[in-house]
Amino acid sequence: MASQSSVNPRRLVGIQAERVTHVSSTDYPGHYPDEDHSWNLQKFKNNLRVKVQRLSQRSIEFDLVGVDASIANAFRRIMIAEVPTVAIEHVYVWDNTTVVVDEVLAHRIGLVPLNVDPALVSMKENVAEVATDRNTIVFEVDMLCERNPQASKDATEASELYINHEMLSSHLVWKPAGEQEEVFATNPPAPTNLNIVLTKLRPGQAVHMELHAVKGIGKDHAKFSPVATASYRLLPHIEITKPIPPHLAEKFQQCFSPGVIRVDPRTKAVRVDPYNVRRDTVSREVLRHSEFTDSVKLSRVRDHFLYNVESEGPYAPERLMLEAIRVMRGKIANIKDAAAALLDQDVLTVEDVEMGDS
């Protein structure tokens, strides 16, 4: 990571006590006299950087550097609303005598994330399209709550007193059809979390349902969104403009998030930690104190985005950005085809190019 002092001032968004300055980009032709800022592919490649900072089974933090905010935000929005997943769409209720009404229980079941790879499922062209083994995955729930004859007389917990006292996501049983057994042989369809409580039952209550899962995208319904959250923020930039008096070092340190400011235990010299500066929330607490008014400058790096993405579906977290790029490329191809049609008057008079969602 580049040191805080080496960042080009033109890349900084100023953070002052009452306002934010220099929020707009200036790297375009004509803004600076005698400087060529026309877009250049090689320059873009040289400045573009992606670095993974943390990766776990369900989440990823990575840096995207060298793109405009419009592009960074487009990737975020695509990850939330346009990367496809598979979720339960149709619920056929044969029996439900629980205290949760059919519509509410169906809604809860629809929100259960599934482990189905969307690449293995076709998307329906419309809601009226016939369900097949290529575009629909079927689950079944068939359970009855009964008293546990083996329960002790002193038992008080429902788990001891009753059999099937809860309907869990693990009760969704996949019913393969057609070639699905072969297609999903290595990863049978199931909820990603088997312990989600959907409803509770008591003796005599039963649930019998057939569930149809289809492929969709988050902008149609939130249950199709592959992420729990996808957000970004700009990299904080802190510049200490003059030495901090030793007796104020600890007070200065406490104005920032833990780990951002380092204080030498012997000399009380203050410096900014070049890596942990990313932890700062830029609360501007330091600007409230008159003794630090001219001692520090706060800003954010305009083209350095810190992403935090949590996967809640079939995608490994490191795959989500790649899927967003794939969707973006499809959109660009659509625009390219439309532009080519506009240039070709013969094509334009015969048939206009339809702009799709992909």
Image (cartoon, rainbow, N blue to C red):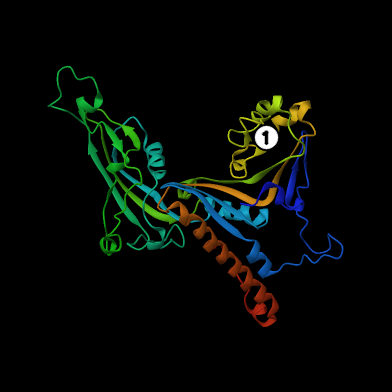
Residue drawn at x 44%, y 57% as measured from the top left: 127
Residue drawn at x 40%, y 50% as measured from the top left: 87
Residue 62 vertical placement versus 264 (above, below): below
Question: Residue 336: x and y, percent?
Answer: 63, 72
Image quarter of residue 261: top right
Image quarter of residue 26: bottom right
In the picture as drawn, the residue positioned furthest to the bottom comes out as: 346
Residue drawn at x 37%, y 52% as measured from the top left: 213
Residue 132 vertical placement versus 350 (above, below): above
In the picture as drawn, the residue positioned furthest to the left comes out as: 150
In the picture as drawn, the residue positioned furthest to the right comes out as: 33
- Residue 219 visible somewhere in the drawing: no
- Residue 190 visible somewhere in the drawing: yes
Question: Residue 279: x and y, percent?
Answer: 59, 39
Q: Amino acid at mark 1?
A: Val
Q: Is residue 168 left or right of residue 218?
A: left
Residue 346 vertical placement versus 189 (above, below): below
- Packing grade of label 1 (10 A; few <14, some 14-19, many >=20) is many
In the picture as drawn, the residue positioned furthest to the top comes out as: 154
Residue situated in front as seen by the camera: 169 or 307: 307
Residue situated in front as seen by the camera: 310 or 205: 310
Residue situated in front as seen by the camera: 264 or 329: 264
Q: How many numbered markers are drawn?
A: 1
Question: Residue 28: x and y, percent?
Answer: 77, 61
Question: Residue 327: x and y, percent?
Answer: 53, 62
Residue 296 vertical placement versus 50 (above, below): above
Residue situated in front as seen by the camera: 350 or 19: 19
Residue located beneath label 1 in the image: 270
> SS of the residue at dot 1?
strand
